Amino acid sequence: AKILTDRIGRIEVSATMAVTAEAAKLRAQGAKLVDFGAGEPHFATPRHIKDAAIEAINGNFTRYTAVAGIPEVRKAIVERHACDFGSDYSPEECVFTTGGKLAIFNAVQVLVDHGDEVILPVPFWVSFKDIIQYAGGKPVFLETSEAENFRITADAIEKAITPRTKAIILNSPSNPAGSVVSPSDLERIVRLAHERGIYLLLDECYVYLQYTGALVSGGSFTDAKEHVIVLGSLSKTYAMTGWRAGYALGPKSIIAAMSKLQSQSTSSTATFVQKAAVAALNSSQECVAEMRADYLKLRDRILNRLSEIPNITCTRPEGAFYVYPNVSAYLGKPGAQTAMELAGRLLNEAHVVTVPGEAFGTKQHIRLSYAVSHDDVEEGLKRMKEFFAKLS
Ligand code: PLP
């Protein structure tokens, strides 16, 4: 008899898991790996944020709270957003979630039905595809051009719309390529979605890690926000990946539906995490600027080192903390037929952890996270240079 549901069969274990497991095995054998695999800050969570959580615990702020979050945290989110992006949300238009991923998952669950199409630009963060499929929706992949920095335009999105399109998922700056939608295109996309009655799900978890141009949010266009759902996270901005702190901003009815779903699954996020989030959002944002400045230096360093490896090309990321080099010149050889195989050999022979492009919907790339120390960038890229020299 069938044990598992059809819906669980529609998704896969995160593609990065295979690499992580293989890396763990090597590490257990004593290998000194340089890890460009994990998509998380190498910084510690800032002191004042940790202190707020400790204070909450010691003050016995440890009981259930309102499902959507304490009023204080919802207020802190809408105020931070208004201050940084000129948005205009009320606390009722905000739900605090157990990580940004859950905000995305719940938004898709309440908006996407069986057979609904969801436009998803390629390369994509792999979870988007599985989250859409779990809801019964159909991802409609939208190819972008590497020559144009994988940039997503309003024109391309307009062409991909069909009568079955229910939603568009955009992630800017993006994982894995660090591409950024230009402010004018973002405004056009927001207005296009509004005119057509399509929901625009904007994953803005890297919105504060943008290196050029003005910071904009989908929530900035206040007269056309009825079809916009902003999905945010404190994970990358404040080096809080393990805390599980995310949020959604959007129309009241959608936020209420997401809270209803949360009321029957996770309930609220941990109380002391909510207090820590308030401290993160309401205190000086200097820590964010400091981390961003270091990421920018790391980006330039890794791009320089990559450019010293013959026949590897790489777009210039404008945000997030990943580079997505094209390694096609080295593919198709025995033992390195695919990016997946190449990443496996890089791991086993050079002890460098990367994630193959297959995880993001392209076949000619590997992803490197540069949220690591400057020493790791130097050591890892030295190893890669030697590895590719032997391979060619
Ligand atoms: N969205 C993107 C594009 C990401 O890369 C990540 C994390 O890697 C997330 C969302 C989820 O972050 P979290 O659930 O930690 O808030």
Image: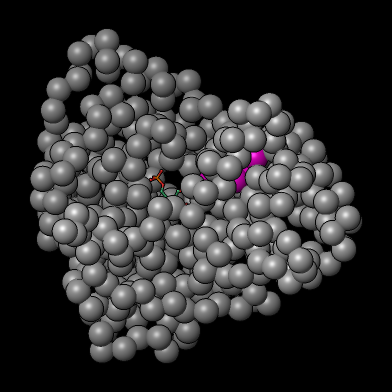
Taking the spot 40% from the left edge, 40% from the top edge, the residue there is: 234
Residue at 76% of width from left, 45% of height from top?
A: 349
Give the extent of the magenta segment: 35-39
What secondary structure prevails in the magenta region? Answer: loop
Residue 276 located within the stretch drawn in magenta: no
- Image-based side of 305 in relation to 32, left or right: right
How far across and down, in percent of the image, does residue 128 sit? 38, 62
Above or below, 198 against 354 in this view is below
Residue 38: say if magenta: yes
Residue appearing at x 24%, y 77% in the figure: 116
In the image shown, does 286 or 36 lie closer to the viewer? Answer: 36
Q: Quadrant of the C terminus?
A: bottom right
Quadrant where the image shows the N terminus: bottom left
In this rendering, position of residue 24 left or right of residue 72: right
Q: Is residue 115 visible?
A: yes
197 horizontally vs 313: left or right: left
Across and down, in percent, residue 196 comes to: 26, 84
From this view, report whether residue 355 is shown above or below residue 26.
Answer: below
